[in-house]
Amino acid sequence: MGNRLNDLFLRFQKKGFIPIEIPGLIQDVFNMLGKGRYCSIINVNQELEDLGWGIEIMDNVTYELVNSLFNKKLQTSLS
């Protein structure tokens, strides 16, 4: 899980986010995924834009990294 998190931090830093912002951004995406409804990259990007994070934050790789971390967190909390 650590490598995925490091990769995710690097991806967000390359998009212009500073390290202190990234946990909040990830948490916002986790909250979207945790609503239990299908979230596409388009939906997540729109909600992030609505929250003031910017435009087109998620690309395919970034989305898959966040989604895999969310699923890992969910599995851990259920066991």
Image (cartoon, helix red, strand yellow):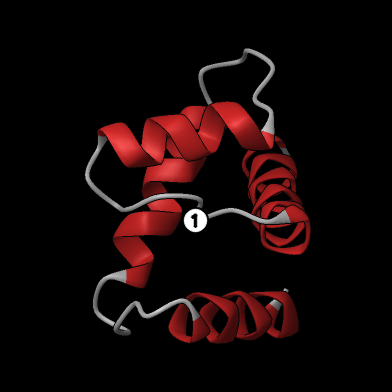
Locate residue 42 relative to residue 3 in the image: left or right: left
Total count of labels? 1
Q: Name the residue under label 1.
A: 57
The residue at the point 67 percent across, 82 percent down is 7
User: Looking at the rendering, which quadrant does residue 69 occupy?
Assistant: bottom right
- Spot occupied by residue 59 in the image (x, y as percentages of width and height): 68, 56
- Spot occupied by residue 65 in the image (x, y as percentages of width and height): 72, 61
Closest to the observer: 64 or 31? 64
Direction top: furthest residue: 37
The residue at the point 62 percent across, 42 percent down is 77
User: What quarter of the picture does the C terminus occupy?
Assistant: top right
Dot 1 lies on which element? loop
The residue under label 1 is which amino acid type? Ile
Q: Work out whether 18 lies above or below 55.
A: below
Q: Work out whether 71 lies above or below 4.
A: above
- Spot occupied by residue 56 in the image (x, y as percentages of width and height): 50, 50
Locate residue 60 relative to residue 21 in the image: left or right: right
Locate residue 32 relative to residue 54 in the image: left or right: right
